[in-house]
Image (tube, grey):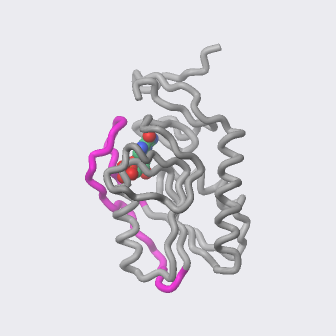
Amino acid sequence: MDNSIVLNGLRFQPYLRREQIDKQVARVASEIRRDFEGKNPVFIVVLTGAYVFAADLLRNVGINENQVEFVRYSSYEGGTSTTGCVKQLMGLRQEIKGRNVVIVEDIVDTGLTAERMIADLMAQEPASLKFATLLYKPESSRTGYTPDYAAFTIPPKFILGYGLDLDGKGRNLPDIYACEEG
Ligand code: 5GP
């Protein structure tokens, strides 16, 4: 049976199934719970791609006295490769000085967005800052940045589904798909 899908003329094959995703999200959640229980963490979710991961992750972490904030950055302007130029589109509405912060991101590719966000947030003097990502592509790194928590380490494929998009499409897909073209 062909379970592939085509979006914008590109063919995507199933890559990670919901059961695998659920298992790894639960693992990352238990690591975060172990490290942040009793520390009143602030989760900073990076829009838009991390919204599905964040919803599952935070329910699995299960720390009720947490706080959730959102930021938005952009580096992709359509298509399947980064522009290399990171822009902040929406910043924090809440002070994080002295707080224990966990950034929740969909994917670390070149690492440029992660480095920019960390620099922006460190300027606000949090007590601690950790980075949790659904997907980590070490072979695409231009910065050498390694996230503190990663659900999956993957090769440099273009990914779709479970919150990740192609030109705004495909975020609704419950599984993760990879582009055939690499
Ligand atoms: P970086 O700055 O690490 O190169 O890229 C970070 C952002 O690029 C991610 O938050 C995500 O929005 C986008 N991105 C990187 N790789 C992929 C991918 O494989 N699929 C999708 N849909 N977006 C990606």
Q: Is residue 73 visible?
A: no
From the top left corner, tell me how far across and down residue 25 is, in percent. Answer: 66, 52
Q: Could you say which is closer to the camera, residue 6 or residue 153?
A: 153
State which quadrant residue 20 falls in: top right
- What residue appears at the point 71 percent right and 70 percent down from the top-left corner? 63
From the top left corner, tell me how far across and down residue 44 is, in percent. Answer: 52, 66
Q: Could you say which is closer to the camera, residue 91 or residue 177?
A: 177
- What residue appears at the point 39 percent right and 64 percent down from the top-left corner? 90
Q: Is residue 85 visible?
A: yes
Looking at the image, which residue sits at the far top? 1
Q: Is residue 127 above or below residue 67?
A: below
Position of 104 with respect to 23 (left or right) is left
Magenta-colored span: 72-99
- Could you tell me what secondary structure mostly forms the magenta stretch? loop
Position of 169 with respect to 32 (left or right) is left
- What residue appears at the point 72 percent right and 59 percent down from the top-left corner? 60
From the top left corner, tell me how far across and down residue 139 is, in percent. Answer: 40, 43
